[in-house]
Amino acid sequence: MQILDLELGELAARISAGDISARAATLASLEALDRAGRALNCTVEIYAEEAIAAAEAADQDLVRGRNHGRLHGVPMAHKDLFDVAGRVVAAGSKIRKSYRAGSTASAIRSLAEAGAINVGALHMSELALSPTGYNQHLGPCRNPWNPDFVTGGSSSGSAAAVAARLIPASLGSDTGGSARIPAAACGVTGLKPTYSLVAKDGVTPLAPSLDCVSPIARSAADCALLLDVIAGPRAADPATTNAPRVNYSKAIGMARKAYRIGVLPSRLLRGVDSEVVQALDQTLAVFRRLGMRIEEIDIDGFDTLNVLNRTVLVIEAATLHRRDLAERPNDFSGHVRSRLQTGLFLPATRYLEAITLRGKLARQFVERAFATVDLVFMPCLPIPVPAIASDPEGVSGTGSADIMDFTRAMNYLGVPAISIPAGFTSSGLPASFQLVARHFEEARLLAAAHWYQQETDWHRRQPPAST
Amino acid sequence: MESAPDMQNDLHAIARLQGLTQDQWLTDRVATLARDTNDLVRAIAARELELGQAPGDFAGLLLEAAQRAQSDADSGS
């Protein structure tokens, strides 16, 4: 078995045991990012010199009996919107191409403190504004299952690099589906945590009220490990002050429980492609085999919540970029400029209404959706993965109905949600499903996903374009 | 319903308020999407907003949930 075939937890254990050196793992990732990563267009920057030096130091420390932590010597690369001191962090844009970070984001620092080695920065949609991964400046990131298909976005490079076995895990971000959709399209696992569970200082914002730092890995167990390391209160982000401290890896290792899983009424699934529905049905059969009780829940659709998410998103994003829209409009690509400008033409009263209603609507959703169940099951990507040629102008996700129909609402509600591989459609691209939990119930979410992945091997399938 | 020229005039007036001097990018599509979104949110607010609601309600909900999650984690449930 190649080093990069190992999942995050396995690789970390083998490095800590001295079976594999941090240097060997890091060199393998660096080479993979340089070759396969550039072929897929998921590599933006490689930090070779610093990464090799850090890996050699990790190996020397281990010999001296000093283990840095649970990710000792493990190479990782992240979406190009996390500040890394001294590095240009362009967020997939021309607008920020000269922005050099003065310090490192808390999330990346937490990984480093646990021993992870940052080997580079990965492709993303311009300013995190495209659910297909479209980027006019960088060109399209290619799906490792078939390079003619989109990776999903905006954490396009993170999902592609994990799927292609260039790195065992990555951090992305999610404002309306930006981690879950690419994870779904590339056949890996993507977790959007509860709003304010993970610090997001030093993360280029799209819409601060909705943005969540999001682990992307091959398995739910690996997402749990990452969450163990990055979640919880951090002084640099006061929003995390009350975040609970939970050992997620321990929680998923506990005895299996017969969770009650809620499914959406069929009227809410009318727009979902039949191949996706088939994958969802097969997934439910697995959950039944696992002893889970499946029942239909009674909730309204997501239309209202999706509208409110989009309103908050475009107004906050327009506010952040207003000066550049005035002074450098030509440095945005057309679809990004158009979306941002929409936010400039909405009154402040609409924004405050959307923000004010969030507490009431989130409480209502939780009370209704979870009245009799522990988790809610639904599609993630409601259509088969689209071809790159189907979105030549990057306009997907800019209208009122789109591939984020089942993901956007969760950011407005602030609840945690995970996308999990669930087979393949006839095009040979991954199918997926999504599980949603109450606020801060990531342990339950990850446990159910982990048990599903003990019964299936979709998340272990290897795409053709891998190392 | 506003006519297209009226809508464009409104759009350009707001663009100036926002400091946009190069407003040749403003299209009917932007105007339509902004107007539709405005109408939808206004209707949602008319239906859902109640006296006593505040932007801080969501933070309160998160605090309750965080305390419950911490308690569950501490008790191993």
Image (tube, coloured by chain):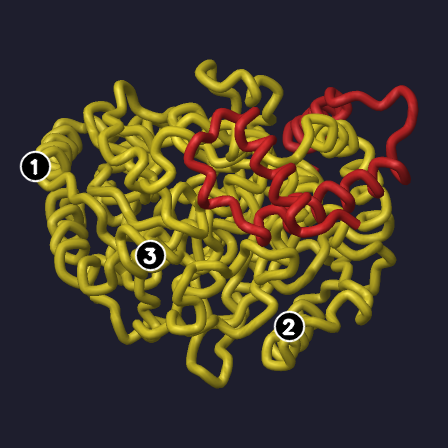
Chain colours: A yellow, B red
- Residue placed most toward the observer, A82 or A115: A82
The answer, for residue A82, to whether it is visible in the render is yes
Q: Are marks 3 and 2 on the same chain?
A: yes
Residue A128 at what x, y percent from top left? 43, 44
**As drawn, is A352 to the left or to the right of A58?**
right
Q: Which residue is mark 1?
A: A49
Residue A334 at what x, y percent from top left? 41, 51
Q: Picture quarter containing residue B66?
A: top right
N-terminal of the pair, mark 3 or mark 2, is 3
Residue visible at 59% across and 25% down in the picture: A243
Q: Amino acid at mark 2?
A: Leu
Residue A335's place in the image compared with A206, above or below, is below
Q: Chain of mark 2?
A: A
Q: Which residue is mark 2?
A: A280
Q: Chain of mark 3?
A: A
Is disc 1 in contact with disc 2, using a CB cutoff of under 8 Å?
no
Q: Which residue is mark 3?
A: A162
Q: Chain of mark 1?
A: A
N-terminal of the pair, mark 1 or mark 3, is 1
Is disc 1 in contact with disc 3, using a CB cutoff of under 8 Å?
no
- Residue placed most toward the observer, B66 or A152: A152
Q: Amino acid at mark 3?
A: Val
Residue visible at 66% across and 27% down in the picture: B70
What whole-number distance in Å separates the C-alpha atoms at marks 3 and 2?
A: 23 Å
